[in-house]
Amino acid sequence: MNSHTKRRSIVLLPSLERTIERINDKKQLELILKAKEKIERMGRDALKILYVRKNYAIGEIKYKSPPYRLYVIYDQNDETFYLALWVHKKLQEKIMQKMKKELEDVLIYGVEHLL
């Protein structure tokens, strides 16, 4: 770790854990691991930021083949990345609405209530 690299905290949320347990496709599991490693290496720059509310941001890492997205909630104050959801791109709009609602709940009740 060089002097420019800040130690990032990465938290796997129960919602993603449940999804991972159901995945039978090795390629998808490898992509989730690859995305986690990318966040460890690049931090916020690994994400495409989709929505920001106060000190939290919702971001994604997307793949085209298979067409899936890893959704991440990022706490900008302490560099914590909450790996939240792995979903097919066709569910993107529905998932963003759900995540925006979850983010509002975090602002009210705290990060312990995430997904």
Image: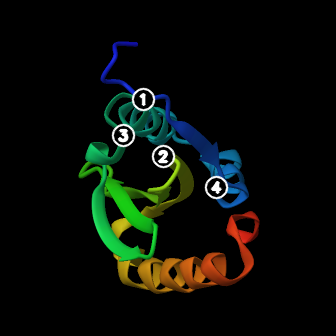
Relative vertical location of residue 65 with respect to residue 2 in this rendering, above or below: below
Q: Are marks 2 and 3 in contact (CB under 8 Å)?
A: yes
Determine the secondary structure under disc 4. helix
Three-letter amino acid code at the position of disc 3: Gly
The residue shown at (37%, 74%) is: 52
Q: Quadrant of residue 24?
A: top right
Given residues 101 and 18, the one toward you in this image is 101
Residue carrying label 1: 6
Sequence order check: which comes first, mark 4 or mark 1? 1
Distance from label 2 to label 3 (Cα)?
A: 8 Å
- Which circle, 4 or 2, is nearer the viewer? 2
Three-letter amino acid code at the position of disc 2: Glu
Position in image of residue 5 (x %, y %): 36, 24
Few, some or many C-alpha atoms within 10 Å of disc 1 (few <14, some 14-19, many ≥20)? few
Sequence order check: which comes first, mark 2 or mark 3? 3
Residue carrying label 3: 43
Q: Are marks 3 and 1 in contact (CB under 8 Å)?
A: yes
Determine the secondary structure under disc 1. loop
The residue shown at (75%, 64%) is: 112
Few, some or many C-alpha atoms within 10 Å of disc 2 (few <14, some 14-19, many ≥20)? some
Distance from label 3 to label 4 (Cα)?
A: 23 Å
Relative horizontal placement of residue 28, taking residue 63 as reference (left or right): right
Given residues 27 and 112, the one toward you in this image is 112
Q: Are marks 2 and 1 in contact (CB under 8 Å)?
A: yes
Relative vertical location of residue 49 with respect to residue 44 in this rendering, above or below: below
Distance from label 4 to label 1 (Cα)?
A: 29 Å
* Image quarter in which the N terminus is found: top left
Determine the secondary structure under disc 2. loop
Residue carrying label 4: 19
Determine the secondary structure under disc 3. helix
Give the numbered dot on residue 79. 2
